[in-house]
Amino acid sequence: MLLIAIAWSAYFHRHEHAANMTSMLPGIGFDVAKAFGQHQEGAVFVLNQWLWPSFDLTVMLGLGLPLFLVTLTGQNMAGLAAIKSFGYSSNPDRLLVASSLLSAVAAMFGGHALNLAAITAALCLGPQAGESVEQRWKASAWAGVLYLLIAGFALWVIKALMWLHPVLVLTLASIALMSSMTAALQQAYQDKDLGQSLPQTLCLLVVLSGVQLAGLGSAFWGLCFGKLAMLLQNPRSQDDVKNA
Amino acid sequence: MQAFTAGAIAVLVGYASSVAIVWQALQALGASVSQAALALAALSAGQGFLSLYLSYKSKTPLLFAWSTPGAALLISAGVNDFSSAMGAFIFAAALGIAMGLLRGLSWIMRLIPTQLASALLAGILLRLAIQSVEQGFQQSMYVPVASMWVGFFFDASTLEHRRHFRDVAHRYCLVSLLS
């Protein structure tokens, strides 16, 4: 592993980008150290415990309904917001039907729910996925290919990824998403009139707070409060013109 | 290459950030190790198929994922019968199909202007960055976390922006995969 890292840094030194390496060395060192300290038990991917779903009304209402609501408000709406923020058009209902159909298929194998991604989607929607807006679909298509490839080795991949420290993954994600975040902030405050920016600020603050109310996450409540502020601030007619 | 790197980082982050929660949720519902592994494989294949097919068809970057908040909810649900949990998953999917066919989601999304959608996304991403620093300090990981951030800002201020993001993305992804 260390050899790979050294070879890697040598390679990039020649390509005049060696400075970037410095930011990653501590992260690699930590993971390598951790990996050496762990013993992994080999687990085999077997299909000998096939299970048919059974339908219990209490579980369907007590588990299925909240699962649907949380997935809708926490993931699908956030994912659509990301798509909208970057100026792409989409048909939300067609996407919901497609992901729910595949979700039903996955459920036959025990998968809980599929939906639009939010944070990882921003990686494929933003400037880091390509300079040309029309070509960025290739990023999520590649992600799809990788997901399909990984599916067969799910358990091994998980074992491997559990070596990575969650905080380092979080840091990697937030650094990779800095440009998307800046773009989203610019979009949110595109109005020059700062007196009109209260709804955005309210939405931002509620989402940042991470509150959980009535079982629904801060993404949903941020949108609710933002919309409420918008309705209070603008006359109804003006609001409709803005949306059109 | 840039598109591939962004996609690979998305997959890495998608798995690594939430696979533990999904794994925990499946086990809390009473799934055996091989049942949970099969479920993860099915979820991966499902999100892979959706992302690839719909992105290609619409020429729009559409990325799908398993439901992380959903998994967090399942951990504390207190159900210990995986077979009936699977029934509940199918019920939730059926609700989604019904809502889509009734055009309910388009109606909701039409109420949300771009500024609010962007504020929501910015909030989610800012929160991520704050958590990175906050948790780094709580778990005595200041050295690696702070070095990564300092390295990022040092690079960002010295290199041309667009090229920079491509390069950083490229290297973070590959090095993380290697380590």
Image: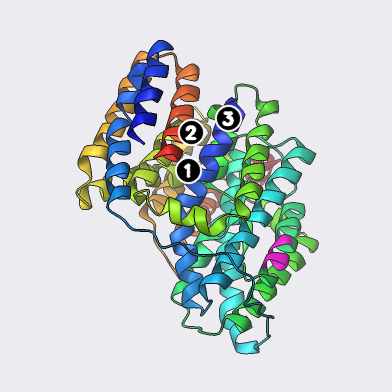
Q: Which amino acid does label 1 sit on?
A: Gln
Q: Distance between the residues labelled 3 and 2?
A: 23 Å
Chain of the residue on which disc 3 is drawn: A
The quadrant of the image that shows the C terminus of chain B is: top left
Give the label on residue A200, or none. 1
Q: Which amino acid does label 2 sit on?
A: Tyr
Same subunit under labels 3 and 1? yes
Left or right side of B58 for B146: left
Mark closest to the chain's N terminus, 3 or 2:
3
Chain of the residue on which disc 1 is drawn: A
The structure residue drawn at horizontal position 37% and vertical position 18%, both measured from the top left corner, is A10
Magenta part of the protein: which range? A102-106
Mark closest to the chain's N terminus, 1 or 2:
2
Residue A133 position, x and y percent, is 66, 26
Q: How crowded is mark 2: few (under 14 residues within 10 Å), some or many (20 or more)?
A: some
Residue A29 position, x and y percent, is 28, 38
Q: Mark 3 points at which residue?
A: A129
Q: Looking at the image, which is closer to me, B70 or A9? A: A9
Left or right side of A217 for A239: right
Label 3–label 1 contact, CB within 8 A? no
**Which corner quadrant of the image does residue A174 belong to?**
top left
